[in-house]
Image: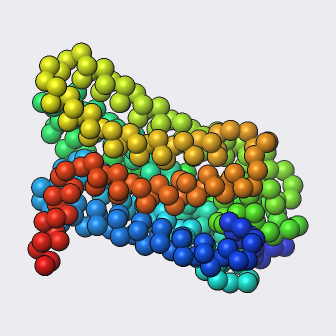
Amino acid sequence: MLNQTSVTEFLLLGVTDIQVLQPVLFVVFLAIYVVSLAGNGAILMVVISDPRLHSPMYFFLGNLSCLDICYSTVTLPKMLENFLSTHKAISFSGCISQLHFFHFLGSTESMLLAVMGFDRFVAICKPLHYTVIMSHQVCTQMAVTVWIIGFFHALLHSVMTSRLNFCGSNHIHHFFCDVKPLLELACGNTELNQWLLNTVTGTFAIGPFFLTLLSYSYIIAYLFFKTRSCSMLHKALSTCASHFLVVVLFYAPVVFTYIRPATGSSVEQERIIAIMYSMVTPVLNPLIYTLRNKEVKRALRRSISRKL
């Protein structure tokens, strides 16, 4: 069934309507985008090219970097274009496509972080069975599975949103197309869409988050009660700390956006939170992993020295 909307395009009102700030914000977000591409691209390059990093942990880290590159690219180029444009329009199909890929990549990253937590759990708590449990075939199957589930989760939202009737204002009080701002513009009953957003997307956010917490709770308990070596304890906790920091930075704003009630939230709060998980987190991920991970730093040095 085709969408029976009278709206053919939407106007993205962006981060702010203060004109003098537009050039400044353009430079700031362009720098964020470049750093995100460079940092995640560097990690992806060394994970692929360095044989020493061909292990499950770095295989999933490469997937995370690939996701972050795509995640930033879904929203930032259009946002940068709008900073320099007076007509901040996006077509109806372009809006639905942006919504789809945003939720596709976001839900995939949510599940991938849980898989990375499980990988650390097996590596630390089941070291003798690690190579069997986390074989190359199993890792590939897990990665493919989370990408496929993320795609169909996003497809649910994009199809359901595209079937809504938009007959009034086409002004989106956001810098990209998301389900919540579009539901506010829709004419007619949106209860099913709202239920899907709260329940399905909520499950995709809370479920992996609790699985990740469970993995790390078990790791911490295991290390304190079973490990005698202080150096081994420190090394294991240091490895997990970087991943857990990424988990907190990603899940906290997502939960705040999609789980809490819509009432009482301001447009400014929504925008700031969206910037956190869609732009700031992809920039911080490579910094966290490279600054806290000696193997990645050594691989980057080897890669740079080969090119000099």
| Number of marks drawn | 0
Relative to residue 153, is residue 9 drawn left or right? right
Q: Quadrant of residue 171?
A: bottom right
Relative to residue 139, is residue 27 drawn left or right? right
Could you tell me which residue is drawn at 64 percent across and 66 percent down? 176
Q: Quadrant of the N terminus?
A: bottom right
Whether residue 77 is situated above or below residue 3 in the rendered picture: below
Could you tell me which residue is drawn at 41 percent across and 68 percent down? 35
- In the image, 119 versus 96, the foreground residue is 119
Whether residue 139 is situated above or below residue 235 in the rendered picture: below
Residue 300 seen in render? yes
Residue 221 horizontal/vertical position (percent): 30, 20
- In the image, 294 versus 202, the foreground residue is 294
Q: Quadrant of the C terminus?
A: bottom left
Residue 144 horizontal/vertical position (percent): 36, 53
Residue 3 seen in render? no
Residue 6 horizontal/vertical position (percent): 84, 73
Whether residue 73 is situated above or below residue 206 in the rendered picture: below
Q: Furthest-top residue in view?
A: 225
Residue 232 horizontal/vertical position (percent): 16, 30
Q: How is the image coloured?
A: rainbow
Could you tell me which residue is drawn at 62 percent across and 79 percent down? 23
Could you tell me which residue is drawn at 44 percent across and 51 percent down? 109
